[in-house]
């Protein structure tokens, strides 16, 4: 229009497609979207289309805008402002969107959806860490070829930790370890001698005498771990998230099972010190997960993220310690942390950054630094199907382990490539699952995994 200043025109809306649209993460994103004028869902994919519509209506979306579509023609015929609700990810290609948010948690389906989005010129915000652990490197390479963004989503720990790590590096800090807390705190009540983890409680009166680290850090941590052996603290999801972080940062696991120290937040700088300095680490530059130990009245770490650094100038860090920052008793290490992750409440930042600034979480292109693999808990016989399920997507009969790529067998199978496959032969207890152990792995996942393996010797490109 004549006389209109083009610079004053409002920015274009950002339209997104969302898979796994009936899930918990999806709810948090859809709810937050209603508060952001520029952000609009244009296609929602979930096997439960009726449930997806009910969720959206509950969140305040107009039911008249929500249309169940079962053919490409129906998707194409949607009026402006309409939201396609589909059960088949293949239908997303015809939907009007700028960004795909992948949240199925299904490695094969999520890889298909992300690949299609990238090849049709859409950015991808990857929330499914299960997909990323197998396909992330290949998808990131494909996105670079097509000039679009592939990124983990802000609001989940991988993106938050990648950005926190890069902030520390930009500040010139010497990063020793990075990681996150486990999903559920260990809440100890000294008045009862019981410890609670989510909705489970056990007697652990020994913790009353273990609330301080004492002089021998490793001995205290061992005693704490023994006191809470009745609670499951390790999860495949934690290992999976650290695999994503490793491939974006170059940090690697110190031990394949991760340390999972039972630790109070104020102790993190002492715990994540090198062994020669009284800590638990055998080397610097690692990723790990810890179990929060706290009292009922103390704030949670809330699944947040941390970086432990060497301090440098002692006067600077003595001053910071006086201000309440976490500095080790020796003064040699400090812990910088963010005690939160807000899931889809924060993910709009990734969507807007991808479209407006062509920006991903972190500045490093992912490369194969760690492998999320599986080690058999007991002997498994040929013909066993490796079923995956539950809230944390555990694989039945298999423990998640995180391997440094440089130390991993060439033919090791990533955990979520093995998931839902059938064993071709007997596999003994305590054995890494190999590609050749699988009778029927997904050919699509094999392709992207083999691509990642070709990058092992080309990690600096």
Image (tube, rainbow, N blue to C red):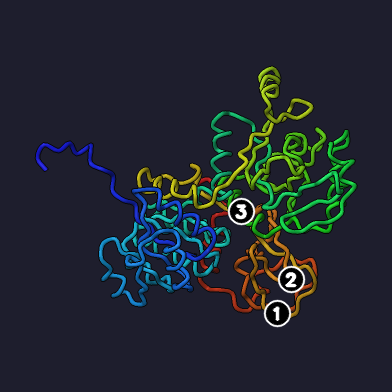
Mark 2 highlights which residue? 397
Q: Are marks 2 and 1 in contact (CB under 8 Å)?
A: yes
Query: 109 or 437: which is nearer to us?
Result: 109
Instruction: Give how far apart the Cα atoms at labels 1 and 3 are.
Output: 27 Å
Local secondary structure at mark 3: helix
In the image, taking residue 203 as reference, residue 82 lies left or right, namely: left
The numbered mark at residue 357 is none
- Image quarter of residue 286: top right
In the image, taking residue 380 as reference, residue 389 lies left or right, namely: left
Q: Earlier in the sequence, mark 2 or mark 1?
A: 1
- Image quarter of residue 163: top right
Residue 251 percent coordinates (x, y)? 63, 44
Instruction: Give how far apart the Cα atoms at labels 2 and 1 are.
Output: 10 Å
The numbered mark at residue 384 is 1
Instruction: Give how far apart the Cα atoms at labels 2 and 3 are.
Output: 20 Å
Name above or below for residue 188 compared with residue 452: above
In the image, taking residue 458 as reference, residue 430 lies left or right, namely: right
Residue 351 percent coordinates (x, y)? 41, 50
Which residue is located at x 47 percent, y 60 percent?
102
In the image, taking residue 408 as reference, residue 115 lies left or right, namely: left
The crowding category of the residue bearing disc 3, from other C-alpha atoms within 10 Å (few below 14, some 14 to 19, many at least 20), is many
Local secondary structure at mark 2: loop
Residue 308 percent coordinates (x, y)? 68, 36
Q: Earlier in the sequence, mark 2 or mark 3?
A: 3
The numbered mark at residue 241 is 3
The crowding category of the residue bearing disc 2, from other C-alpha atoms within 10 Å (few below 14, some 14 to 19, many at least 20), is some
Residue 186 percent coordinates (x, y)? 76, 49
Q: Earlier in the sequence, mark 1 or mark 3?
A: 3
Query: 238 or 86: which is nearer to us?
Result: 86
């Amino acid at each position: 229009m004549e006389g209109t200043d083009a610079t004053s025109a409002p920015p274009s809306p950002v339209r997104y497609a969302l898979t796994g649209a009936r899930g918990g993460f999806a709810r948090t994103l859809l709810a937050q979207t209603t508060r952001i004028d520029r952000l609009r869902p244009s296609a929602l994919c979930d096997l439960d289309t009726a449930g997806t519509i009910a969720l959206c209506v509950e969140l305040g979306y107009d039911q008249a805008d929500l249309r169940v579509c079962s053919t490409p023609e129906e998707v194409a015929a949607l009026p402006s402002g309409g939201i396609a609700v589909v059960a088949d990810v293949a239908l997303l290609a015809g939907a009007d969107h700028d960004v795909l948010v992948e949240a199925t948690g299904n490695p094969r389906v999520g890889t298909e959806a992300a690949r299609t989005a990238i090849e049709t010129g859409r950015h991808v915000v990857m929330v499914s860490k299960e997909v990323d652990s197998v396909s992330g490197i290949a998808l990131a390479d494909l996105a670079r070829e097509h000039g679009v963004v592939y990124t983990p989503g802000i609001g989940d720990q991988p993106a938050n930790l990648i950005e926190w790590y890069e902030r520390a590096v930009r500040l010139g800090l010497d990063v020793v370890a990075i990681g996150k807390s486990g999903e559920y705190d260990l809440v100890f009540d000294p008045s009862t001698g019981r410890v609670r983890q989510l909705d489970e409680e056990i007697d652990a009166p020994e913790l009353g005498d273990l609330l301080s680290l004492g002089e021998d850090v490793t001995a205290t941590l061992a005693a704490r771990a023994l006191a809470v052996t009745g609670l499951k603290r390790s999860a495949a999801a934690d290992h999976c998230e650290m695999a994503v972080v490793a491939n974006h940062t170059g940090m690697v696991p110190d031990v394949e099972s991760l340390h999972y120290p039972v630790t109070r937040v104020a102790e993190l700088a002492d715990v994540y010190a090198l062994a020669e300095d009284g800590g638990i680490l055998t080397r610097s530059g690692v990723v790990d997960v810890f179990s929060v130990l706290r009292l009922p009245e103390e704030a949670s770490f809330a699944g947040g993220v941390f970086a432990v650094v060497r301090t440098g100038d002692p006067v600077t860090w003595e001053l910071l310690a006086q201000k309440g920052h976490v500095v080790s008793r020796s003064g040699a290490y400090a812990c910088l942390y963010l005690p939160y992750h807000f899931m889809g409440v924060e993910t709009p930042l990734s969507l807007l950054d991808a479209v407006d600034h062509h920006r991903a979480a972190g500045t490093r292109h992912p490369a194969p630094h760690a492998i999320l693999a599986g080690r058999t808990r007991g002997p498994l016989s040929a013909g066993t199907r490796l079923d995956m399920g539950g809230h944390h997507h555990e694989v039945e009969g298999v423990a998640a382990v995180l391997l440094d790529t440089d130390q991993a067998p060439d033919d090791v199978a990533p955990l979520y490539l093995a998931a839902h496959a059938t064993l071709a032969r007997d596999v003994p207890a305590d054995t890494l699952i190999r590609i050749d152990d699988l009778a029927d792995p997904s050919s699509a996942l094999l392709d992207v995994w083999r691509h990642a393996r070709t990058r092992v010797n080309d990690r600096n490109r």
